[in-house]
Structure formats: C-alpha cells, structure tokens
C-alpha cells in the first residue's frame, strides 16, 4: 500500500535496506557519526521510515544528545508500531537511562512481534535478572535454551535461573542434562577450570538442598578428578562430613587441608576443633564462618575438659606439622588455663615485642572474652576490660618486662636473651595501648613521650599518641600530633589518610582537603577526584563534620554522594550477569547476587542513611538552621543596630559573590588549560549545586521517611535502624509505626539508653495525638503497655531509676537518660535527678569524654537549677580527663 | 638477629629525600646540641646522593644518619677536594652497637670502590670538625678509622661551650 511508505512502515528498497544494515553495524562498532550520516541519506528519500528514525535516535543518544534521541526514537516508533526493531531500540534507550521497568515493557512488545528474536530475548533476560524478576528470568532463559540448545551459556543460565527460583533439584538436573549432551572425551569433561567450577557449583547447589549432605559428599568424591580448586573441594568435604556427624573422617580432611598449607586459616583450625570435640551440626555451621582469629574456642565457652582435649590433640597432631605457623602458636592462647596460659601468653608477648608488632595490643584484646547468653563476646568497655583476668595478667607481665628491661635489657632476670633497644620501645608502646584500653589516657601519654625520646622517628608512636589525645578529649591536639607524624614520611598514604580523618573530626575540613589532596590526582578538582574514586570514608567523615557545623546543605550533599556510590555498586552488577556465566564462575556469581541483594544493608550505607535522616530531622525541628545565611532578626534590633547589621550583610554577600565568581573563572580557565594542554578532552563535570541547596528544598520528613524505610528493609537487625524509624515516624504522627519501631528496638537492645528515652517520650506523646482511628487506638491500648512492662509511666521511670541506682556498673548514657526522664515526668526535682549523674556518673560503663560532654549538655539545658551540679561535674571530669578540651 | 643484646645492630641503609627529611631533623635534634639551618637540609635533599647521605634503619625505624659532601680543599691550588662529614648521628638508645662505625665505614667503602670515578677522582682526604670537649667522638674517629687530630679552630661554634673545635682528617691517597 502506498500509504505505508509515507507512514514509515514499508520495507525499504534493496539499496536503502543495505544502507540500513550498515547503520546498525556502525552503531555496533561505535562509529556513531558515520551511522548518522548514512541514516540521513535514507531519511532524505524516506523521511518517515520508522526503523531508520529509531536507529538515528539511538545513535544520537551515544553522542550525549539525549533529548534529540528520545524525540527521534519516539517518532520512529509512532511511525512503525509493528516493528520489533523500533520497540527494541525504544527499550535500549530506556535501559541507557537506567529506566529498567520501561525497558522491559518495550522488549516484551518487541517480542510479541518477533517472539524468537534471540538478541531481544537475551537483553530482556539481563534486565530481568538485574531487576530480580526471577520467574520472568527463568521463563526467558527457558525460551532461549529451547531456541538454541547447543550453546553452553544457555544451559548454565537456565540452571542458574532454576537455582535462583528455588528449584534446586531442577538446577542440578539441568546441569546433568547439559553434561549428558557432551560427547565422551570432550574437554568439557576433563580436569580444567570450567569443568571444575561447574562441578563445584553443582555441589554447592546439592548442599543447599535440606538434609542432602550425603549426596553432596558422594558427588564431591565423584567429581574429584575434574576439580582444580582443591582447597574449596577439601573445605566442602569437611563441611559435609561435619554436617553428617562424621567427625573422624572430617578430621582426616582437615589434616589434609593443613598439609596443603592452609595453616593460617583460623576457620580450618576451628573445623579441627569441631572434629575433636565432635560438635553438633548447628555449632559446626557457625564455627566454620567465623571471621579473623575466631574459632570454636572464642565462640562458645568450652569446659576445661573440652579445652584440655583440643589442646592435647593440637599439641600432638598439629605442632609437629606446623612448628612455625603463627596461627598454630596463637590458637593455644584460647585453649590454655592457669599457669600454662600464663607461660604461653608470656612467650607470645615476648616474641612479638622483640619483633616489633604494633598491633599486638589490639591482637591481645580479642582475648578479653566474657560470656553473654552462653556465647562469648569481646569485653569492650574500659570497666569490663579492667576487671578481666587476662587483661590483668598481661598488665602484670608487661610491667615486669619494663622493670627488667630498664635494668638488664632482658624481659626477665631468668631470660637468656638480651634484647635490642627496640624491645623497650615496643614494650612501652604496648603498655600505653593497655592503658588506653581502660581509658587511662594520661598514663599512656607519659609512655608515648618516653617512646618519642627513645626513637623520635617512630611513626607508629605518633599514631598511637594521636588516638590517645583523641580519647583524652582533645581532638585538635590529636590532629596536630598526627600531622607531625605524617611529616616524617610524606609517602605514607596510611598516616596521611589518618591525619585527614582526624582533621575532619576536628572540624578542620580545609586542612583535611589539603592533606588528602596530596594523594589524589594532581590535575583537576581533588574533591571531584575523591568522588570518582568512591572514597566513601572521606565523604562520610566530611558529612559528619558539616553536620557538627550545622551546614546541612553541604552535609546532605556529601551523604548523597555516598548514596550515589551505592547506586553505582548496584548498577555495576549488570556486566557480571553475562560475564560470570560465560566464564563459568558460578559460585562467585551467586556471591555477587547475594551481595547486591543485601547491598543497602552494608554498614557504610547505614551510616550515610542515618546521617541523612538525622540532618533532615534537625532541619525539620529547627527550620531556621537550614538557611546557612539566614537573615538576622532585624525586628528585635534598634534602628542603629539594624543599619549596621544590614550593611554587614551586604558586605558579606558581596564578598561571597566575588569569591564565587573568581572561583568560577579560575575553574573555567583551568578547564581550558587542561583541554589545550593535553588535548585529551577531560569530561569537565561542573557541579551546579556544590552546596546542596537543592537538597535543602526537599520536604525533610518525606526524605527522612524514604531512607528510614530503606533501613527497615535492608538493616532490620541494626538497632539504630529502629531508632531512626521511630524518630521519623513520631514526627510524622505515625503512632503505630513509632510503636512498632520501639518494640523492635527493645528486642535488639533493651538496655540501651536510647530506647529508654524514646519509650518515655512516646508514652508522654501518644495519648495526646488526636484524630486517631479507633482501630489504631485499640492497638495502642493493647500493645503499648508492654513497653512499660505493664506499669504506669511514673512507676516505670521509678523502677528504672531504682535499677540504675543499685547497679554500680550502670552506664553513663543510661544515667543521663534516667535523669532526664525523671525531670520530664516531674518525678524528681532537677537537682535530685541530676545527682544521679554527678554522684555516680564516672563509676560505671559507657564513660568516655564524649558521654561526659553529653552529660554537660544536660546540665546546661537546665540552667540555674543545675548550676551547682554543672560545676561539680566539670571538676570531676577534669580530674578524670585532665586534657579534655573546651569543657566549660 | 632480633634478640641482639649488646651485639651489633644489623642496620640497613636508606636514602634521604624531600619526603623523609623530617626524620633527619628529628634525629639531629635528638643527637646534637646545635641545630642545623635550612640550607643544610636543603643541600642534603637537593643532592640526593644515597652514597654520601644516608639513614641507618633498625627494625623499621631510622636510628642514625650520616651526611657528607665533596668540597674543594680551601687552600688547594690545583683543584683538589675532600670528603667533608657534615653530621654523623645515632640515637642515644642505639649507641654502642657499631651503628656509627657502619655508617662511616660505608662512606669509606664507597670512596674505595669509586676512587677514580667522577667527583671522587679529585678527593684526597676525609675531614670533619669536632667540638674540643667531645672525647668520645675524637676517640671514635682516631682509634677506629685512623683519623688524625689537627689544628684547633677557635670560636667555631656560636651557641655552645666550649666553642672551639678540632679538625680531624684522614688522607685517602
């Protein structure tokens, strides 16, 4: 029909059709300009040809002409809605905008027209797995496999789809059918990387089937000949055997791992203990995934008999195999008791001190274990560390070394070896870290002074001294100290970064930027470079620094940068969907998918999200602070003052404008220089909102809600998630969500002061919220008494007060919270309530210069009524922390 | 080697650069009663000669350093020159373990194996100034390396007492 050509639907004549094929080829070869030229040639004759219009649009999109591209592709599609090419192109355009749901829709339209188009099917399957439309992914992969069953990738992708949709048996049989299609003697069946990975993946899936460890174990034996990853093979075998309770056989496997050289892997030592102790499958499961130096012996408290048994076996069986293994020497420290323990730790310390191991103090601190709910946890609070027998033993030993070293340069009088001068240095250093662990900063600093007299070139000592000064409450001095240490070796990136971090914590963000810029690219804007390198730790510290300065726009801007990095991390997986299948790294691929599924549960994301939430809540609570350059309150001034203030404001504004203009010019000039200089086109990213003003204009509660919801979804086991969720919900008047958050947080950490404060706040606030639905009221009446343990608010506060008073180790933050609650509920007078903090505040847990400052804020809040308590508190804190800065 | 008692320290040598010259400052401040001016440090960094200016490292830290230079012999008429030892310092805690001996020894070894190469071809002697009261240093150079005690230069130092020094020297050819 002649009309079709005008509408752009008609097939092109031979010559133009060939041209069109070349347009596609140019696009694929990234020769965009040539492609556009040819497309224009076709369009001259057939200006409405849909597919050509679409292809031209797609090509323009690659030349950063996004808007023209969209217009052309849409026009092409409208002219030829029955073309799969147009729909495909439309999908590709959305995909490049990361608008995946729209892209999927377009691909599906294209497939309606051309259901067997492999290219479109493949593109669709990639988007489906990216979006985790797992069922859709399985269907698409099945279609592809049916169309092209002679391609390995199609089999593996379909097996993966089966696994991801939970059909584990199905995944195994897909792999088996695939293997059955191979002819005997095929290299795919021989020992090699790909066949090995496939076998190990099959085994991984088998072991995921409940109670299927026997089959998995048999399969491991069967596939042994093709497997090249022998370490993983042995680990898998030991795992299956332990799950089956085959402790003797498992031990043989573990010994084989040691013989292979896996002697420094503490997980293997942990597996060894599981075998010797014949532990149950559930404990074994946990014992095999411990991190760092963790083993069964640091996971659960073992009986003396159990420890003896492991130690005897270790001594007899492992020692001779690995006499020089550091791990084998350290493991006994977690098994021995009494005098044997003392001897072992004595030898361990002496050896490390002679060698000079800066991390010895923190290494030893992992031995301060205390029992909580039948599990071991690390003692972290100074109070708990100070009373720990292992800590006390180490202090006693180290004090002995110091005395002896000073007299006879030996660790002890009965020791044969005389020590080199650095042993004394490292022993002082260790003693200083031991002081630090219990909050004795002044004592520790005296020792680091000795260290620096002894060896003023020891960079590590400056680091320790910096962290001591920080703990002692003088972050400015700490940053200065690190800066001095940094001067010693300007090529040391570690101390340079540490200095940067301390400078940020001291609110000196300008100096911090100078320091870190020493290690960024020398051309261009360092801040931009740090963003490009996704330097998250820096951005988080900088955001926190702006938050302290209440520069909320800049603060949000930096947190938003971190959020962007995580979006990019998520996007980054796209390339792996096809790459991993092609390379048959299927086990690693499942790890990637798993990692991406939990991406927003990563701690750094949590920090950023909480930072954003708290910034928006601060803005919501005191809107005036959002405006960095808020107008002063002219109304309350005398005319003369007003005139002066306005003149000042004008002057300031002018200066700022001038500065901004000269900066812009400089940047422009620099850009030109760069472009002229190296001819390379540096993609000049101009940030048109460096101060985050756009972020300040958003609705604070809506934004906070968004991030709180993400935390709830991805970090439900994080205590602070629910604190944030509460803080946001209560401000939004969402009483039930607030209640739910409190109940969740209360399960995770019932002893936290943060939850106590909020329970009190909630109990005071929610009865006053009006206009609640009757069902909501019902739920509130039935659920909220649980928060107060069935008591009235006054009773609950009184009971907690009594509890805190009678517990000599109750934490300072808890005492602060209780004092505030007593004042808020008018249960006690201000001086009476504050006496709890003043009298016992420094005696329990949770005492740090930070919590002391929080207490000081509390006293300041109550003004004259708290004046006496305040000065008493200041005196007491200064006695405990003589170096604490600006504590008035 | 880590135990080490009062035995020799097996030090390693390393160069002095703009990035680590601050360690030389710290070392000199700990070792010497006089403070050296910026020119001295600038010269060391600029020359970047790891054979004539070097740190001694023990167990990862700088514990000593020697800085020397080739300079014309002032009274020489035929362009002869000398090796001049500007500073030799070892941190107090690490003394008595032959670190200084190794540092000076390495300078002399360097001369011996390059005596006819480059700027060393015109070098006839190795020289230093030492405060008249510094018996340990005088003994160190004379007994260990055969330096000879020469003339006394009066009021060589400005801020320390005694202000006089001896010239110690050793003929190298």
Image (cartoon, coloured by chain):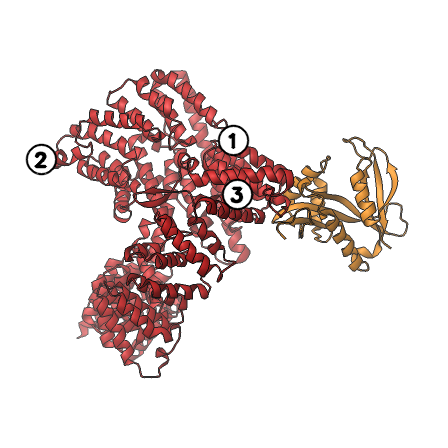
Which mark, by number, is residue A442?
1
Q: Is residue A374 above or below residue A439?
A: below
Q: Are discs 1 and 3 located on one and the same chain? A: yes
Is A823 above or below relative to A766? above
Determine the chain carrying the residue at label 3: A
For the residues labelled 1 and 3, the Cα–Cα distance comes to 28 Å
The residue that mark 2 highlights is: A774
Relative placement, left or right, of A434 versus A842 is: right
Chain depicted in orange: B
Q: Give the mark, 3 or 2, whose residue is nearer the N terminus.
A: 3
Residue in the foreground of this view, choosing between A616 and B147: B147
Image-quadrant location for residue A152: bottom left
Foreground mark, 3 or 2, reads: 2
Residue found at x 84% / y 44%: B168
Residue A515 disc label: 3
Q: Distance between the Cα atoms at labels 3 and 2? A: 60 Å
Is disc 1 surrounded by few (<14), some (14 to 19) or many (20+) residues within 10 Å? many
The chain letter of the red chain reads: A
Pick the quarter of the image with the N terminus of chain A: bottom left
Neighbour class for label 2 at 10 Å: few (<14), some, many (≥20)? few
């Amino acid at each position: 029909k002649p009309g079709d050509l005008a509408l752009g639907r008609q097939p092109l004549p031979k010559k133009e059709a060939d041209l069109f094929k070349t347009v596609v080829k140019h696009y694929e070869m990234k020769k965009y300009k040539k492609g556009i030229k040819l497309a224009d040639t076709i369009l001259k004759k057939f200006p409405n040809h849909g597919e050509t219009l679409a292809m031209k649009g797609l090509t323009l999109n690659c030349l950063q002409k996004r808007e023209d591209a969209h217009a052309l592709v849409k026009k092409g599609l409208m002219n030829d809605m029955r073309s799969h090419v147009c729909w495909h192109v439309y999908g590709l355009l959305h995909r490049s905008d990361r608008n995946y749901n729209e892209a999927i829709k377009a691909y599906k339209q294209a497939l309606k027209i051309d259901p067997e188009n492999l290219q479109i099917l493949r593109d669709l399957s990639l988007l489906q797995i990216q979006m985790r439309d797992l069922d859709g992914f399985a269907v698409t992969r099945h279609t592809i496999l049916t169309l092209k069953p002679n391609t390995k990738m199609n089999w593996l992708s379909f097996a993966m789809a089966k696994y991801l949709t939970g059909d584990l048996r199905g995944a195994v049989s897909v792999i088996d059918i695939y293997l059955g299609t191979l002819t005997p003697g095929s290299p795919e069946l021989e020992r090699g990387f790909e066949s090995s990975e496939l076998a190990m993946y099959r085994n991984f899936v088998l072991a995921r089937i409940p109670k299927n460890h026997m089959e998995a174990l048999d399969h491991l034996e069967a596939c042994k000949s093709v497997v090249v990853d022998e370490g993983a093979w042995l680990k898998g075998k030991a795992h299956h055997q332990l799950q089956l309770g085959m402790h003797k056989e498992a031990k043989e496997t573990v010994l084989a791992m040691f013989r292979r050289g896996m002697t420094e892997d503490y997980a293997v030592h942990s597996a060894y203990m599981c075998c010797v102790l014949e532990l149950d499958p559930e404990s074994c499961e946990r014992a095999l995934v411990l991190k760092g130096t963790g083993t069964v012996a640091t996971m659960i408290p073992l009986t003396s008999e159990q420890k003896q048994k492991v130690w005897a076996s270790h001594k007899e069986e492992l020692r001779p195999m690995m006499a020089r293994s550091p791990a084998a020497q350290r493991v006994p420290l977690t098994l021995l008791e009494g005098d044997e323990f003392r001897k072992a730790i004595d030898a361990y310390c002496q050896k490390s001190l002679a060698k000079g191991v800066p991390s010895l103090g923190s290494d030893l601190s992992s031995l301060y274990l205390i029992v909580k709910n039948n599990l071991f946890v690390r003692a972290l609070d100074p109070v708990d560390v100070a009373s720990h027998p292992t800590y006390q033993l180490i202090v006693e030993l180290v004090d002995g070394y110091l005395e002896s070293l000073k007299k006879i340069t030996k660790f002890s009088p009965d020791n044969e070896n005389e020590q080199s001068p650095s042993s004394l240095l490292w022993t002082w250093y260790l003693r200083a870290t031991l002081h630090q662990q219990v909050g004795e900063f002044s004592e520790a600093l005296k020792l680091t002074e000795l260290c620096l007299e002894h060896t003023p070139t020891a960079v590590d000592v400056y680091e320790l001294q910096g962290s001591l000064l920080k703990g002692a409450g003088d972050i400015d001095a700490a940053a200065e100290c690190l800066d001095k240490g940094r001067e010693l070796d300007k090529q040391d990136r570690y101390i340079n970064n540490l200095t940067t971090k301390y400078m940020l914590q001291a609110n000196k963000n300008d100096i911090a930027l100078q320091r870190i810029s020493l290690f960024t690219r020398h051309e261009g804007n360092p801040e931009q470079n740090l963003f490009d390198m996704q330097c998250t730790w820096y951005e988080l510290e900088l955001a926190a620094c702006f938050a302290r300065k209440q520069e909320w726009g800049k603060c949000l801007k930096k947190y938003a940068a971190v959020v962007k990095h995580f979006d990019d991390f998520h996007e980054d997986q796209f390339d792996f969907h096809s790459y991993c299948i092609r390379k048959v790294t299927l086990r690693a691929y499942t790890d990637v998918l798993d990692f991406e599924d939990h991406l927003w549960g990563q701690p750094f994301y949590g920090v950023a999200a909480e930072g954003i939430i708290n910034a928006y809540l601060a803005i919501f609570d005191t809107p005036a602070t959002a405006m960095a350059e808020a107008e002063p309150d002219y109304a309350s001034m005398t005319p003369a003052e007003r005139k002066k203030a306005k003149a000042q404001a004008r002057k300031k504004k002018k200066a700022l404008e001038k500065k901004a203009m000269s900066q812009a010019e400089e940047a422009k000039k620099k850009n030109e220089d760069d472009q002229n200089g190296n001819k390379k086109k540096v993609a000049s990213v101009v940030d048109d909102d460096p101060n985050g003003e756009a972020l300040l204009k958003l609705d604070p509660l809506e934004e906070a809600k968004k991030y709180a919801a993400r935390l709830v979804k991805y970090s439900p086991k994080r205590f602070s998630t629910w604190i944030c969720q509460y803080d946001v919900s209560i401000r939004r008047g969402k009483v039930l969500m607030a209640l739910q958050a409190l109940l969740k947080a209360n399960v995770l950490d019932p002893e936290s002061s943060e939850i106590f404060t909020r329970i009190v706040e909630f109990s005071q606030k929610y009865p006053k919220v009006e206009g609640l639905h009757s069902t909501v009221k019902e739920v509130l009446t039935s659920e909220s008494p649980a928060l107060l343990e069935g008591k009235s608010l006054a009773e609950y506060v009184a009971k907690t007060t009594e509890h805190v008073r009678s517990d000599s180790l109750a934490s300072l933050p808890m005492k602060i919270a209780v004092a505030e609650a007593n004042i808020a509920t008018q249960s006690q007078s201000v001086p009476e309530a504050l006496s709890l903090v003043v009298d016992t505040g420094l005696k329990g847990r949770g005492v740090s210069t930070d919590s002391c400052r929080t207490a000081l804020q509390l006293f300041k809040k109550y003004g004259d009524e708290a004046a006496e308590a305040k000065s008493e508190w200041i005196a007491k804190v200064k006695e405990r922390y003589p170096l604490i800065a600006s504590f008035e | 080697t880590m135990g080490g008692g009062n035995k020799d320290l097996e030090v390693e040598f390393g160069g002095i650069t703009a990035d680590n010259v601050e360690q030389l400052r710290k070392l000199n401040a700990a070792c010497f009663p006089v403070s050296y001016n910026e020119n001295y440090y600038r010269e060391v960094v600029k020359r970047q000669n790891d054979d004539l200016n070097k740190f001694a490292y023990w167990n990862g830290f700088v514990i000593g350093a020697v800085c020397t230079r080739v300079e014309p012999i002032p009274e020489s008429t035929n362009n002869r020159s000398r090796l001049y030892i500007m500073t030799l310092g070892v941190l107090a805690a690490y003394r008595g373990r032959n670190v200084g001996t190794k540092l000076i020894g390495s300078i002399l070894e360097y001369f011996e194996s390059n005596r006819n190469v480059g700027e060393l071809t015109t070098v006839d002697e190795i020289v230093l100034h030492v405060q008249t009261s510094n018996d340990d240093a005088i003994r160190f150079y004379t007994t260990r390396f055969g330096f000879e005690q020469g003339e006394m230069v009066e009021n060589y130092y400005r801020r320390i007492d005694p202000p006089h020094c001896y010239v110690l020297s050793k003929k190298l050819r």
